[in-house]
Amino acid sequence: MEEIKIQGHAKFWIGEEGILHCKLSNSNMDKKLDYKTAQLYLEAIETLSKGRPMPLLIDLRSTKGTFSSAAAQLLAKSLDNMPSVLCEGYVVSTLSVKLLVQAYKRIYKTKIPFGIFNNLNKATEYCLSHNN
């Protein structure tokens, strides 16, 4: 299984079910995702997907903190224009992270379908439903 690790930030891989997984890890509440790291995330998505359309499952259960507005704009605009991302499934474990994702999606109004879940299995089911 090919995987890409972005030291101290995230791990990306394609699961056996054909879903592109992203597991973010940040235990520092004061740390913000910056523009440069957001670019690395996008490069990892492009590298692993090789242009093949697939769902993106983003696991935010091990992360705290937020993102810079520049990083958020870059991710929203770039993901919206990536033909390799069919949908986004977010897995959250706290209300604050859920609200952050909802605000991000409301502000940046992307056309990619998304769902926010408290359970990895539900997020996986959602992604699989968009993979067919």
Image (spheres, helix red, strand yellow):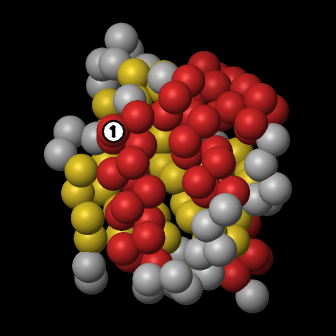
Q: Residue at x 34, y 18 (%)?
A: 31
Q: Would you say residue 122 is visible in this rendering?
A: no
Q: Residue at x 48, y 41 (%)?
A: 60
Identify the residue position indicated by label 1 in the image. 36
Q: Residue at x 30, y 56 (%)?
A: 11
Circle 1 sits in a helix, a strand or a loop, which is it? helix
Q: Position of residue 98 (x, y in %)?
A: 65, 30
Q: Position of residue 65 (x, y in %)?
A: 43, 20
Q: Would you say residue 114 is visible in this rendering?
A: yes
Q: In the picture, residue 97 is in which quadrant?
A: top right
Position of 38 with respect to 113 (left or right) is left
In the image, is residue 3 above or below residue 24?
below
Q: Residue at x 74, y 36 (%)?
A: 108
Return the residue nearer the eye: 105 or 77.
77
Residue that sits furthest to the left in the current view: 7
Q: Amino acid at mark 1?
A: Lys
Q: Quadrant of the C terminus?
A: bottom right
Position of 10 with respect to 124 (left or right) is left
Q: Position of residue 111 (x, y in %)?
A: 81, 56
Residue that sits furthest to the top in the current view: 30
In the image, is residue 30 above or below residue 86?
above
Q: Quadrant of the N terminus?
A: bottom left
